[in-house]
């Protein structure tokens, strides 16, 4: 079986969750005997699996779906939603009137939709899609990889000037309003004894939503001694920071899954997340802590600083919870789906 992953604007997506998940899945599918290309040219293919919903993806899907007597099938991963697009880029909040019919039409070209979470599936159902043509398959992460490196943790914290008595709180994501860097910064400003790192690509303020508001927040962050906005970092640097950290603060206003959250748990970080339906697979006080306001997030972080037993309990339980997102399960489900419809 030959599968082509359509990942338009591939170079621009490097470093994003969409790019990382798609390339990871494509590589692992080959282990199941499925010849998988990313933006391949080796026609013909049995399945075209769209990973993006960009305009060029739309026209490719339209052309592929209209061909008579076609022997291939079209799949789409439905992680692009109206809810996920809002509060991201310049004018994104003014485009609902166009985006709703656009996405509805785009996804209608698919023979089958893949939702990356139950929450993602619920959104696609609200768009009017047949539940029998939607399957939930987590993007997943590799749980066989040993991410923890105590020596790297010690060396990194030493280089950063962070003592073991201090909490290092990190997050990973684009610096856009939807990801809530403003909330992250406010939490950090109210918790001056802890260190906070925002790791992720810093986009030009002229290209993102609520740029004037965020500009003031970033100015406040630059003046604070306990906040660092790193911008894009290499994989090696990211691994060092994952190991050095204690807490993963995920205050994003909207997600369809959140691969960075899965990674954080795999590294043994304690997740403090927004109380949002997409994170319902996590249980408060068992494998995470939850909040909705700056005060609530700050209180949860302070609880962890004062309660090492709570940290260890959440870290231990997180390992078991994460098993449902093992990439081996994801790849097997995806391979089974290909076989079923192919």
Image (cartoon, rainbow, N blue to C red):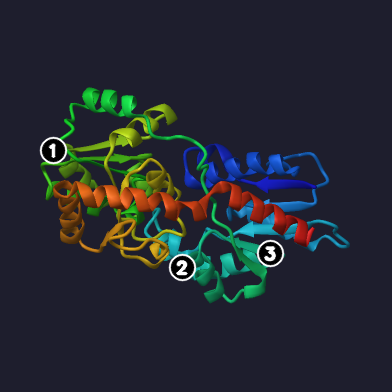
Tell me: 116 left or right of 88.
Answer: right
Residue toward you, 188 or 156:
156
**Residue assigned mark 3:** 112
Q: Where is 201 relative to 290, above or below?
A: above
Q: Is residue 54 visible?
A: yes
Q: In this rendered view, identify the residue nearer to me: 92 or 45.
A: 45
Q: Does residue 250 appear left or right of residue 7 in this picture? A: left
Q: Which label sits in the foreground, 2 or 1? A: 1
| Within-10-Å neighbours for mark 1: few <14, some 14–19, many 20+ | few
What is the distance, in whole Å, between disc 3 and disc 1 at their CAs? 50 Å
Label 2 to label 1: alpha-carbon separation: 36 Å
- Nearest to the observer: residue 41 or residue 118: 118
Numbered label attached to residue 161: none
Which part of the image, by quadrant, shows the C terminus? bottom right
Measuring from the top left, give residue 139's x and y in whole percent.
54, 51
Identify the residue at horizontal 41%, vertical 46% (top origin).
260
Name the residue beneath numbered marker 1: 223
Which callout, 3 or 1, points at the residue further toward the start of the chain? Answer: 3
Q: Which residue is under mark 2?
A: 96
User: What is the number of callouts on the image?
Assistant: 3
Residue pictured at 18% horizontal, 42% vertical: 221
Q: Position of residue 229 (x, y in %)?
A: 27, 38
Q: Residues within 10 Å of mark 2 (few under 14, many from 20)?
A: some
Cβ–Cβ below 8 Å for labels 2 and 3?
Answer: no
Badge 3 marks a residue whose secondary structure is strand
């Amino acid at each position: 079986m030959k599968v082509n992953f359509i990942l338009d604007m591939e170079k621009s997506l490097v470093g994003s969750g969409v790019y990382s998940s798609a390339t990871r899945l494509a590589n692992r599918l080959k282990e199941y005997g499925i010849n998988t290309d990313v933006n391949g040219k080796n026609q013909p293919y049995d399945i075209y699996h769209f990973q993006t919903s960009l305009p060029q993806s739309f026209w490719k899907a339209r052309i592929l779906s209209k061909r008579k007597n076609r022997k291939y099938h079209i799949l789409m991963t439905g992680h692009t939603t109206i809810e996920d697009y809002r509060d991201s880029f310049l004018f994104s909040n003014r485009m609902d009137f166009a985006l709703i019919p656009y996405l509805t039409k785009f996804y209608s070209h698919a023979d089958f939709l893949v939702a990356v979470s139950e929450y993602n599936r619920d959104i696609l159902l609200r768009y009017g899609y047949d539940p029998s043509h939607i399957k939930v398959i987590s993007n997943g992460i590799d749980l066989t990889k040993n991410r923890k490196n105590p020596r790297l943790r010690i060396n990194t914290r030493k280089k950063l000037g962070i003592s073991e008595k201090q909490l290092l709180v990190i997050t990973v994501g684009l610096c856009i309003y939807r990801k809530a860097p403003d909330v992250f910064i406010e939490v950090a400003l109210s918790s001056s004894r802890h260190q906070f790192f925002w790791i992720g690509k810093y986009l030009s303020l002229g290209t993102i939503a609520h740029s004037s508001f965020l500009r003031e927040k970033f100015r406040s962050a630059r003046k604070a001694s306990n906040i660092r906005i790193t911008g894009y970092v290499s994989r090696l640097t990211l691994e060092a920071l994952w190991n050095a950290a204690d807490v993963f603060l995920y205050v994003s206003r909207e997600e369809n899954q959140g691969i960075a959250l899965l990674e954080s748990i795999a590294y043994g970080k304690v997740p403090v997340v927004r109380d949002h339906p997409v994170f319902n697979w996590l249980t408060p006080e068992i494998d995470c802590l939850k909040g909705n306001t700056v005060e609530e997030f700050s209180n949860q972080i302070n609880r962890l600083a004062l309660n090492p037993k709570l940290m260890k309990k959440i870290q231990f339980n997180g390992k078991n919870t994460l098993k449902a997102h093992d990439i081996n399960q994801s790849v097997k489900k995806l391979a089974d789906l290909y076989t079923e419809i192919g």
